[in-house]
């Protein structure tokens, strides 16, 4: 039976989020589900322009509050133009990052209060939350090596957060795990080490559990 719902795939840099989003979308489409793949910041023309501003340049290019407001502006467009229309049309939405990343990066990473971030999110988009957030968990040092290699090989100018120090990325990992501990019914932590196929199998196990009668 085709699925409807909203999933976010979260995790630190280099955990393989984009690959898992593509894999999940392809798997569900083969089963007859209409899927919308999207990402944050991005997902719309406006969001992609904000993405280029926030993810490039020096690590101190933005004050943490300016960064949060830019991310929120991108999310308003993303929710109103992509996510809500897709959900209202009965499609399944998979987003590469959502609110969890804002709490982790601008909150734990950059030092802004989580309550402030959540309140801004609620005022901006009506407190829309994913039905499930899949957190890909990996040693930040390993993830950073992966991400920096990818940016170099693809010649992509999106390495502003990768330029930040290891303690920054360790705080991000800690935040994601803390979010999952505090709300286990809406989060699933997946070991992102090993081969892409290993991680795919683990994510499919999460999907199978989520689809089980009575699990939602």
Image (spheres, rainbow, N blue to C red):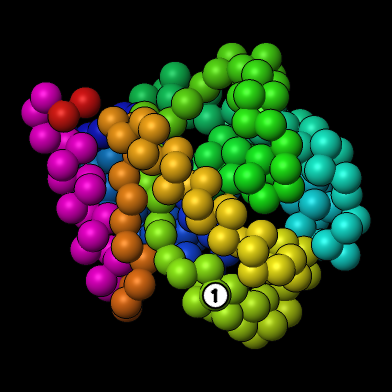
Q: Is residue 42 above or below residue 2?
A: below
Provide the residue designation for mark 1.
141
Q: Secondary structure at mark 1?
A: helix
Horizontal and vertical percent position of residue 88: 44, 19
Which one is nearer the viewer's eye here, 92 or 109?
109
- Residue found at x 43% / y 66%: 138
Looking at the picture, how far across and down is residue 65, in whole percent? 83, 36
**Which secondary structure type mostly characterizes the magenta part of the structure?**
helix
In the shown orientation, is residue 203 left or right of residue 143?
A: left
In what quadrant of the picture does the C terminus appear?
top left
Q: Which residue is at a point 41% across and 60% down the rendered structure image?
A: 137
Q: Residue at x 66, y 40 (%)?
A: 107
Instruction: Name which quarter of the figure residue 43 lies in.
Output: top right
**As rendered, which of 184 and 101 lies closer to the eye?**
184
156 shown above or below 98? below
Which residue is located at x 88 percent, y 49 percent?
62
Q: Is residue 145 left or right of residue 206?
A: right
Q: Residues within 10 Å of mark 1 (few under 14, many from 20)?
A: some
Q: Is residue 99 left or right of residue 199?
A: right
Residue 199 belongs to magenta span? yes
Image coordinates of residue 90 in percent, x first then y, are 36, 25
Rendered location of residue 94, percent (x, y) = 43, 43
| Residue 162 falls left or right of residue 69 | left
Q: Quadrant of the N terminus?
A: top left
Residue 94 in sight:
no
Circle count: 1
Q: Does the magenta segment cover residue 54?
A: no
Q: Quadrant of residue 118?
A: top right
- Is any part of residue 2 visible from this angle? yes
What span is colored magenta in the figure?
Answer: 197-214
- Find residue 117 and report its image quarter: top right
């Amino acid at each position: 039976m085709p699925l409807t719902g909203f999933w976010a795939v979260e995790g630190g840099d280099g955990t393989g989020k984009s690959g898992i989003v593509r894999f999940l979308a392809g798997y569900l489409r083969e089963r007859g589900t209409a899927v919308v793949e999207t990402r944050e910041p991005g997902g719309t023309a406006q969001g992609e322009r904000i993405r280029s501003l926030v993810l490039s340049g020096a690590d101190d290019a933005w004050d943490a509050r300016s960064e949060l407001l830019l991310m929120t502006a991108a999310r308003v467009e993303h929710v109103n133009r992509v996510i809500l229309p897709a959900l209202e049309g009965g499609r399944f939405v998979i987003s590469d990052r959502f609110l969890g990343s804002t709490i982790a990066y601008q909150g734990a990473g950059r030092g802004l209060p989580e309550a402030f971030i959540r309140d801004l999110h609620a005022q901006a988009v009506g407190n829309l939350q994913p039905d499930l957030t899949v957190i890909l968990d990996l040693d930040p040092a390993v993830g950073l090596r992966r991400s920096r290699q990818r940016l170099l090989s693809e010649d992509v100018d999106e390495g502003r957060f990768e330029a930040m120090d290891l303690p920054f990325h360790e705080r991000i990992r800690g935040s994601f795990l803390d979010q999952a501990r505090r709300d286990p019914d809406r989060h699933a932590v997946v070991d992102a080490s090993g081969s892409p196929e290993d991680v795919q199998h683990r994510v499919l196990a999460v999907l199978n559990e989520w689809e089980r009668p009575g699990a939602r």
